């Protein structure tokens, strides 16, 4: 079976600290991050990974700082 890997540009391996050696792959419904140099591997359940991914925040979540803004036309006094 062929596994498609996507390399993560600019990432360092947490074990060997090599640059540009981490790749993402998906096996049996799990997202796996692995280092092609030292063999480090970290598996994450696909459903759990999507929920904690900061890019997938729900629209109903409040922003960090909210408030009312007022737009003022500088030409009018």
Image (cartoon, rainbow, N blue to C red):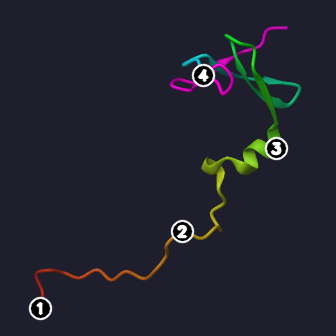
- Mark 4: few/some/many CA within 10 Å (<14, 14-19, 20+): some
Q: Earlier in the sequence, mark 2 or mark 4?
A: 4
Query: From mark 1 to mark 3, how far is it between C-alphas?
Result: 55 Å
Q: Are marks 3 and 2 in contact (CB under 8 Å)?
A: no
Identify the mark at residue 47; answer none if there is no mark.
3
Compared with 26, 51 (above or below) is below
54 relative position to 26: left or right: left
Q: Which of 40 and 53 is in front in this view?
A: 40
- State which quadrant residue 29 falls in: top right
Closer to viewer: mark 1 or mark 3: 3
Q: Residue 2 at what x, y percent from top left?
A: 79, 8
Magenta extent? 1-16
Q: Residue 33 at what x, y percent from top left?
A: 72, 26
Residue at horizontal 81 percent and vertical 45 percent from the top: 48
Q: Residue 13 at what x, y percent from top left?
A: 64, 23
- State which quadrant residue 20 falls in: top right
Q: Are marks 1 and 2 in contact (CB under 8 Å)?
A: no
Q: Mark 4 points at which residue?
A: 17
Q: Name the residue under label 2.
A: 64
- 42 falls in the magenta region: no
- Mark 2: few/some/many CA within 10 Å (<14, 14-19, 20+): few
């Amino acid at each position: 079976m062929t596994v498609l890997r996507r390399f993560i540009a600019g990432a360092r391996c947490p074990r060997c600290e090599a640059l540009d050696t981490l790749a993402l792959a998906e096996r049996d419904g799990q997202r796996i991050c692995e280092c092609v140099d030292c063999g480090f591997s970290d598996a994450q359940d696909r459903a759990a990974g999507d929920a904690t991914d900061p890019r997938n925040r729900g629209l109903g979540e409040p922003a960090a700082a909210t408030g009312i803004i007022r737009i003022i036309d500088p030409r009018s006094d």
